[in-house]
Image (spheres, rainbow, N blue to C red):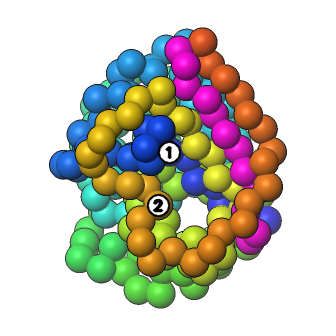
Amino acid sequence: MRKLIMWNLITVDGCFEGAKNWDLPWHERLWGEELERFSLEQLASADALLFGRVTYEGMAAYWQTAQGKIADYMNSLPKVVCSHTLRTAAWNNTTLVNDNVAGEVARLKQQGDGNLFVFGSADLSKTLMNEGLFDEYRLGIAPVIYGKGRPLFGEGLKLQELSLLESRPLSNGCVILRYRGKA
């Protein structure tokens, strides 16, 4: 059975992006050999990626023309985009889910034995969290207080009790935290 895993870089004050979509100035500060190695480890363990519409559109726009090992994974892995508004999904190897998102994700978890990752996608993540579908949360805490922006964990979430699996500090000040969910 697949594990559903959230991966996000967030600021100390909990923002996963700034006031606008894809406003991510702290990402460049954190990117380097250690985070690239971690990203490759995660992608090598994945057998599918799961996105909400906004994240899917941004990822597709970037990765379809990018080069390198991470781009190779991103473009070749099966992808699922959950959206009530999209009618087509053109990025290579993408399936579109328009209805019953939680049910479809629960079904996807029963298929395969690799990891199913959610990147970004705060609205989709909220739905999946409230349904208790996440097996693991992986958060890269950026040593930045942004003071504005969109929180990853906004209002309307049910209580989530987690167990710490790992705390991994990087030389750039980022700390990767892994928590087991209650899925």
The x and y percentages for residue 56 are: 34, 55
- Quarter of image, res 23: top left
Cα distance between the residues tagged 1 and 2: 11 Å
Tell me if mark 1 has few (under 14), some (14-19) or many (20+) residues whose alpha carbon lies within 10 angstroms of its own. Answer: many
Secondary element type, mark 2? loop
User: What residue is shown at x 55% (from left), y 19% (from top)?
Assistant: 173
Q: Which residue is mark 2?
A: 153
Asked if 25 appears above or below 128 in the picture, the reply is above
Q: Residue at x 37, y 80 (%)?
A: 98
With 63 as the anchor, is 4 left or right in this view?
A: right
- Report whether residue 56 is seen: yes
Provide the residue span drawn in magenta.
172-183
Residue 179 lies within the magenta run: yes
* Residue 150, above or below 81: above
Disc on res. 93: none
Disc 1 target residue: 8
